[in-house]
Image (cartoon, helix red, strand yellow):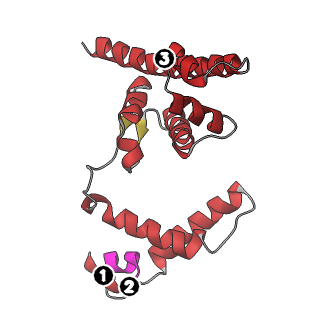
């Protein structure tokens, strides 16, 4: 049964991509025929595409929409996770809960690792860490290379754990607090 579902989902993804390619081809035909002076409304009706869709396609041809860029980014991240992490991918946000994203994960036999929508309690500590990390490290520096970035990340993690005091930990660093409590 699972194999059948996987084949069906793979087929649905391919069918979706084929429909997109077909629509683009239809828009291209409408554009070619409109050069002869034929009515775009009539050509769109014959090609079974919307006139507004044709005009959007014309405007976007040279540039990608924010949705297309986001989709491309998601596809790249899924493939990266598939290659590097062997099938586990953790993200959160509205774009990661979309049906298209879920189908791509299933297509590559990957499992999403994220909390339910609206439940931030399970990752509050890491969200807090990343908030501090961004404001205290990433946003105030620029990095010349990937190696410089990795070094800065390592240094900040060490600083955060051993030197940075936190009010909610009685003005101790996380390591100091753990050793006092233990």
In the displayed structure, would residue 2 be above or below residue 81? above
Number of the front mark, 2 or 3: 3
Residue tagged by mark 3? 48
Which one is nearer the viewer's eye here, 136 or 118?
118
Q: Earlier in the sequence, mark 2 or mark 3?
A: 3
User: Residue at 50% of width from left, 22% of height from top?
Assistant: 49
Local secondary structure at mark 1: helix
Q: Quadrant of the N terminus?
A: top left
Query: Badge 2: few (under 14), some or many (20 or more) residues near its Cα, within 10 Å?
Result: some
Q: Which mark is residue 59?
A: none
User: Residue at 43% of width from left, 33% of height from top?
Assistant: 87
C-alpha gap between disc 1 and disc 3: 71 Å
Dominant SS of magenta comes to helix
Q: Quadrant of the C terminus?
A: bottom left
C-alpha gap between disc 2 and disc 3: 67 Å
Residue tagged by mark 2? 172
Which one is nearer the viewer's eye here, 100 or 131?
100
Viewer can see residue 38: yes
Q: Is 170 covered by the magenta stretch?
A: no
110 vs 43, left or right, is: left
Q: Earlier in the sequence, mark 1 or mark 2?
A: 2
Q: Which residues are magenta?
A: 172-179
The image position of residue 38, as x and y in percent, is 65, 18
């Amino acid at each position: 049964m699972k194999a059948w579902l996987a084949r069906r989902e793979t087929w649905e993804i391919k069918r979706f991509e084929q429909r997109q390619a077909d629509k683009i081809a239809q828009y291209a035909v409408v554009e070619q025929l409109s050069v002869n002076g034929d009515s775009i409304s009539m050509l769109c009706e014959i090609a079974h595409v919307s006139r507004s869709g044709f005009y959007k396609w014309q405007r976007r041809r040279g540039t990608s929409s924010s949705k297309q860029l986001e989709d491309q980014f998601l596809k790249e991240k899924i493939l990266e996770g598939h290659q590097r992490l062997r099938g586990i991918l953790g993200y959160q946000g509205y774009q990661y809960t979309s049906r298209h994203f879920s189908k791509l994960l299933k297509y590559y036999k990957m499992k999403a690792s994220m909390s339910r929508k609206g439940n931030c309690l399970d990752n509050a500590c890491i969200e807090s860490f990343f908030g501090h990390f961004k404001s205290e490290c990433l946003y105030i520096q620029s990095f010349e290379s990937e190696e410089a970035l990795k070094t800065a990340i390592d240094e900040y993690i060490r600083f955060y754990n051993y030197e940075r005091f936190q009010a909610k930990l009685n003005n101790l660093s996380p390591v100091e607090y753990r050793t006092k409590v233990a």
